[in-house]
Image (spheres, rainbow, N blue to C red):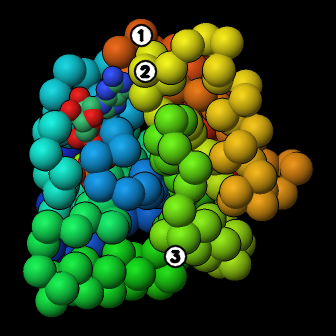
Amino acid sequence: MNVNNVSLEVVCGNPSQFPDTQFNEIAFAGKSNVGKSSLINALINRKALARTSSQPGKTQTINFYNVENKLYFVDLPGYGFAKVSKNLREKWGKFIESYLTKREQLKQVVLLVDIRHEPNENDKMMYDWICHYQNNVLVVATKADKIKRSQIQKQVALIRKALQMDPNHVIIPFSAETKQGKEEIWEILDKWVLE
Ligand code: GTP
Ligand code: MG
């Protein structure tokens, strides 16, 4: 998609604030600090519309970005962030869970994992969960600029194996620094938009 117009439309702290629209939604899920907000910025050609931070736990609300009046990109808070209290962690968990499981407009999820690390239990749970709810899934392996080019395919294979990914599901290495992978990701999202 040729993206010129994007606005942050709704910031939600609880499910009653989810927008009442019929646009399809593509959600970006993954652990804290993996690069969800950075990927959204890259896809919409903006430097900092989605707020990012080197400190995990930056995104604490569910943020809806209106993309060209065609769809919403939905930036989710990250999971597995150890420094917030258990209480808050559970509250976020329930909030994200209610979005992922109950939202009819949601049919597609981009799951982000760090290309440098083997996915953990939370990542695996999230992948299984997305599949269980029959959403389309694309796995994006972020921070590809942080490893040698020669290591990329090896890491991709490791992630595939750890998540026990369906062979039909796609995984794309991406870097918010170099924008490697951006066009491939858009190709998939464009197909989703037409579905
Ligand atoms: P939360 O909102 O806390 O869940 O994090 P997030 O997943 O939205 O991560 P965010 O986009 O805020 O990025 C976290 C940190 O990683 C920031 O310092 C980013 O600059 C950095 N980062 C994100 N993507 C990349 C990348 O592809 N390469 C490199 N080198 N750094 C990245
Ligand atoms: Mg974020």
| Tag in front: 3 or 1 | 1
Q: Position of residue 71 (x, y in %)?
A: 44, 47
Name the residue tied to disc 2: 146
Q: Nearer the viewer, residue 67 or 74?
A: 74
The residue shown at (35%, 15%) is 177
Name which residue type carries label 2: Lys
Element under disc 2: helix
On screen, residue 137 above or below 88: above
Image quadrant where residue 89 sits: bottom left
The residue shown at (69%, 59%) is 163
On screen, residue 20 above or below 178: below
Q: Position of residue 24 (x, y in %)?
A: 50, 57
Name the residue tied to disc 1: 178
On screen, residue 125 above or below 1: below
The residue shown at (43%, 28%) is 143
Name the residue tied to disc 3: 104
Rounded to the nearest angstrom, the CA distance separating label 3 from label 2 is 37 Å
Q: Dot 2, how many residues are within 10 Å of its Cα: few (below 14), some (14-19), or many (20+)?
A: few
Can residue 1 be seen here? The reply is no
Rounded to the nearest angstrom, the CA distance separating label 2 from label 1 is 11 Å
Q: Dot 3, how many residues are within 10 Å of its Cα: few (below 14), some (14-19), or many (20+)?
A: few
Name which residue type carries label 1: Thr
Q: Are marks 3 and 2 in contact (CB under 8 Å)?
A: no
